[in-house]
Image (tube, rainbow, N blue to C red):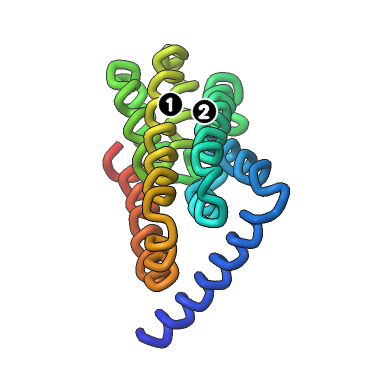
Amino acid sequence: MAFLYHRWHAWMNSLYDWSMQVSRSKYALLFLIAIAFIESSFFPIPPDVFLIPMVLACRKKAWLYAGACTVASVLGGYFGYGIGMFLYDLVAVPILNFYGYMQQFDEFRHYYNEWGAWIVFGAGVTPFPYKVITIASGITHLDLFTFTIASILSRGLRFFLVAGLLWYFGAKIQKFIEKNLGWLSITFFILLIGGFLAIKYLG
């Protein structure tokens, strides 16, 4: 077990170092925007993985990064909404099947619009896969204004909170992250997998 943990820790350190290098490149902001956009519709890795090292590498741009992440994520959410509304059979069904959600979806869609705002908000803040909710919102034709407001509030809260904590604590939190990267990454993936399991069994 200890051997596996050390291998995992070494791999995560390599990934962290690579993310820090990307965060210092002149294309870092465009890279973050692209990840935030596609994560809202089909990409499995959340933008926090790149937002965190980017803020640590340049704290004075924390709010710019958080704002860009929020805007790109909301716009990506519209793309997911469009997939659900216009490309249900061609694209949405395979994606929902991939996340193990298709079986529950027929029941879920009957009451989705009643609680749609809270569902979108909850998925936007938590590790719950936001892309599934954006597609579901399009399939059920959730009111677009409601979808927009819930997305802006939830995505903004999530990304600005992450950026704010990193901006405030700076070097201290960076040392903590680097020292405990192995356990932090394991916790993150447990939360991420928990989100997928919640989709599968709580629908």
* Foreground residue among 123 and 149: 149
Image quadrant where one finds the C terminus: top left
Q: Is residue 32 above or below residue 81?
A: below
* Foreground residue among 118 and 12: 12
- Few, some or many residues within 10 Å of mark 2 (<14, 14–19, 20+): many
| Residue at x 36%, y 23% (from the top left corner) | 109
Q: Is residue 144 above or below residue 46?
A: above
Q: In this view, does 191 lie to the left or right of 29?
A: left
Q: In which quarter of the image is residue 16?
A: bottom right
Mark 2 to mark 1 CA distance (whole Å): 6 Å
Q: How many numbered callouts?
A: 2
Earlier residue among tags 2 and 1: 2
* Foreground residue among 153 and 53: 53
| Residue at x 41%, y 19% (from the top left corner) | 149
| Residue at x 38%, y 23% (from the top left corner) | 150
Q: Quadrant of residue 79?
A: top right
Which percent across, then down, holds residue 132? 45, 36
Say which mark, if any, is on residue 201.
none
Q: Are marks 2 and 1 in contact (CB under 8 Å)?
A: yes
User: What amino acid is found at the position of numbered circle 1 in the picture?
Assistant: Ser
- Few, some or many residues within 10 Å of mark 1 (<14, 14–19, 20+): many
Disc 2, SS: helix
Which percent across, then down, holds residue 72? 57, 32
User: Does any portion of residue 20 appear in the rendered image?
Assistant: yes
Name the residue carrying label 1: 151
